[in-house]
């Protein structure tokens, strides 16, 4: 199976960051139980406090991720909060070209 990396950039309304971060934490608590989940990191920007950046890796293809994971019910609370406090969400589907580890 292919490895998929996904980078998601979310801009939130002023004051909405902590609410969305909590929704992201709850979502990934569930996603981490999926057999194809590899790992994920959630970041906030030091320069732009209303920017949240998520990096996640899966043993999936883009097509299988969209078909098998996105319809799962545990996405609904996150999407509801995102709709309320989010300004912009941009997802980048990534293919690994090079990697280094310490």
Image (tube, rainbow, N blue to C red):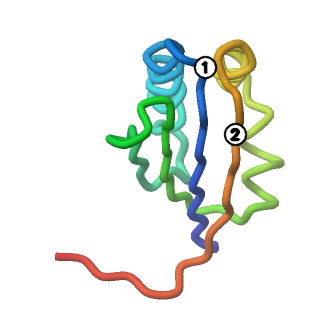
Quarter of the image where the N terminus is located: bottom right
Q: Nearer the viewer, residue 3 or 48?
A: 48
Quarter of the image where the C terminus is located: bottom left
> Is 63 on the left-hand or right-hand side of 79?
right
Tell me the CA gap for discs 2 and 1: 12 Å
Mark 2 vs mark 1: in front: 1
Residue 2, above or below 62: below
Q: Residue at the location (32% across, 41% down)?
A: 46
> Is 25 on the left-hand or right-hand side of 63?
left
Residue 53, above or below 82: below
Badge 1 marks a residue whose secondary structure is loop
Q: Nearer the viewer, residue 57 or 1?
A: 57
Image coordinates for residue 79, horizontal then vertical, percent: 71, 23
Task: Say few, some or many: other residues with alpha carbon within 10 Å of mark 1 (under 14 / 14 to 19 / 20 or more).
Answer: some
Residue 5, above or below 99: above
Q: Residue at the location (48% across, 52% down)?
A: 55
Q: Nearer the viewer, residue 95 or 69?
A: 95
Residue at numbered disc 2? 89
Residue at numbered disc 1? 13
Q: Residue at the location (45% across, 55% down)?
A: 38
Q: Quadrant of residue 86?
A: top right
Badge 2 marks a residue whose secondary structure is strand
Q: Quadrant of residue 71?
A: top right
Image coordinates for residue 33, horizontal then vertical, percent: 48, 36
In the drawing, what numbered circle is on residue 92? none
Image coordinates for residue 57, horizontal then vertical, percent: 51, 58
Q: Quick one: label 2 or label 1, which is nearer the N terminus?
A: 1
Image coordinates for residue 92, horizontal then vertical, percent: 67, 59
């Amino acid at each position: 199976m292919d490895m998929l990396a996904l980078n998601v950039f979310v801009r939130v309304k002023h004051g909405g960051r902590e609410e969305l971060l909590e929704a992201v934490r709850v979502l990934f608590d569930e996603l981490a139980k999926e057999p194809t989940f590899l790992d994920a990191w959630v970041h906030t920007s030091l320069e732009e406090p209303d920017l949240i950046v998520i990096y996640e890796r899966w043993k999936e293809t883009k097509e299988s991720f969209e078909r098998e994971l996105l319809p799962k019910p545990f996405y609904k609370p996150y999407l509801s909060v995102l709709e309320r406090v989010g300004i912009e969400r941009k997802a980048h589907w990534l293919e690994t070209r090079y990697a280094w580890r310490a």
